[in-house]
Image: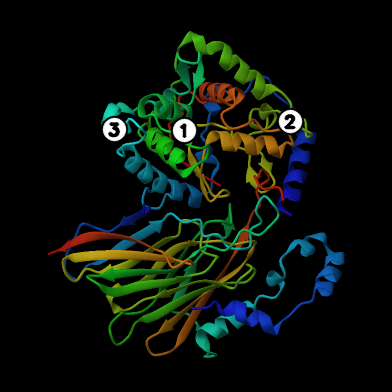
Amino acid sequence: MRALWGLAGIAAALICGVVAAAGIEEGDKRSGFDFMTRETQALQADDTSNPGMLWVLQGEQLWRQPEGRANVACAGCHGDAAQSMRGVAARHPAFDEATGRPIDLAGRVNSCRASRQQAEPLAPESDELLALTSYVAHQSRGMPVTPAADPRLAPFRDNGRRLFQSRIGQLDLSCATCHDANWGKRLGGGVIPQAHPNGYPLYRLEWQTVGSLQRRLRNCMIGVRAEPFAFGAPESIDLELYLMERSRGLPVETPAVRP
Amino acid sequence: MDDPSRNQNLSFPIGRRQVLAAGLAGLVVVSLPRRVLARPSLEEAINTFTGGAEVLDGRVRLELPPLVENGNAVGITIAAESPMTAADHVRRIGVFNEKNPEANVVVFQLGPRCGRAEVSTRIRLATSQVVVAVAEMSDGSFWSSRASAIVTLAACIEDLS
Amino acid sequence: MARALINVPKTARRGEIVEIRAMVAHSMETGYRMGPNGVNMPRDIIRRFVCAYDGEEVFAAELFPAMSANPFIAFTLVATTSGTISFAWTDDAGETQTASADITVS
């Protein structure tokens, strides 16, 4: 039933939707937080009621726990995350020398596990990976999104912008159709937000758990009846790179709560 | 304790044919589990909680947001007027819903050491409906408050089944 | 690893009514949701929550599938004496997660 409503809503948006090439004006940039009801905002704002804090708490424990054949904890190299990880999420994805590509926080955690801890990678969307990335990103809470200035990232960011503006799926919609040209309007019972990635990993009421930006991107792609990117796909990182540039200046909210 | 709403299902069996017949009226009905159709009514669930005692209006306040963005986590607060002394306090507060697959939501057990009869929690509402809170006082009387919420549906959801 | 977030004031005056908040990580799987293979996911919920003050039960709750995932309960207690406020969540499988916090009453 909900899916039918969704389909009807998306179809309506398709008919009304005219893509504006300009995107969001600087003064109009708003976090998804601003589009939520007062009740959902209150859920996020208070750490003792924000369910995402359960993952942050678990991440804090995992940070100090020795892992892998090297038997070393994240804290063994990075020390106190409150200092060493402050601002890190605000400037990721960053350029990874080893692969010559941008890497996101989850990729960084797993790369560290492989090279430093000699441990198996954590599975996408596993509680452990979400907990560690939530804990690391939480250290940047309140700081403005400040994408890395590394010129080597430019071609990947351009590819992300291209993906954002490309129509895909049976519904023939691009990210921009909804989130540049029609944000603020209603789709089904909800308001279309501007699609900023400044709160991830976040607790989504629909998921009833914490999830990554990649999970959210896959949702959108399934929604427009397109084949979603696999977890960790390079396209996903490129898109994240562009989304971070697009949300430059918004505060990091991890762990955000969204409906 | 066993769920009273499940035991009562046995007294309202609905056959597969009836379910299929109902499906002619709307495709959606077919997809609902049989248990959904056979759950006890709101009043029956409250009756089980009170043991059939009379339920009076007042002394309890149920706060429920009138418009809900996502039914998976709806914040509610229940407050009962009571001095919360050993002689006069709230023993239990039961919360019941009208249209979820099961009528019971939660039963809180309180006592004089709580100091105040006020509890907040988060509940699931499958759809727009009425929610009732019933407080059992130490003198054996029952008091209730009801509120309703409209649960809006999001367009972009992950599960398309 | 117990994943619970509890909020108990560290200090209180004797007789003061203090707010207690308790949240625990749990999917609260209702038994009514369909999994990816079209089969209902089995029910797995926390059934009972108990709060004890120096070992004596002072607040409890019986939970049903209509309670949200990662159940959150806020209530009040009278600060009577310095001691430990403990919390226990027991699920369908009979497994119990616990957490506790100390309160100093003057």
Q: Is residue A90 above or below residue A258?
A: above
* Residue B61 percent coordinates (x, y): 46, 72
Q: Chain of mark 1?
A: A
Is C57 on the left-hand or right-hand side of A22? left
Q: Which amino acid does the dot numbered 3 rest on?
A: Ala
Q: Callout 1: helix, strand or loop?
A: loop
Q: Callout 2: helix, strand or loop?
A: loop
Q: Earlier in the sequence, mark 2 or mark 1?
A: 1
Circles 3 and 2: CB atoms closer than 8 Å: no
Is B1 on the left-hand or right-hand side of A175? left
Q: Chain of mark 3?
A: A
Q: Looking at the image, which is closer to me, A157 or A96?
A: A96
Separation of disc 3 and disc 2 at Cα?
Answer: 44 Å
The residue that appears at 71% across and 82% down in the rendered structure is: B12
Q: Which amino acid does the dot numbered 2 rest on?
A: Leu
| Residue that mark 3 sits on | A75
* Residue A73 percent coordinates (x, y): 31, 34
Q: Earlier in the sequence, mark 1 or mark 3?
A: 3
| Residue that mark 2 sits on | A173
Give the label on residue A121, or none.
1
Q: Looking at the image, which is closer to me, B110 or A144?
A: B110
Whether marks 2 and 1 lie on the same chain: yes
Q: Callout 3: helix, strand or loop?
A: helix
Separation of disc 2 and disc 1 at Cα?
Answer: 34 Å
Q: Quadrant of residue C81?
A: bottom left
Residues packed near mark 3 inside 10 Å, few (<14), some (14 to 19) or many (20 plus): some
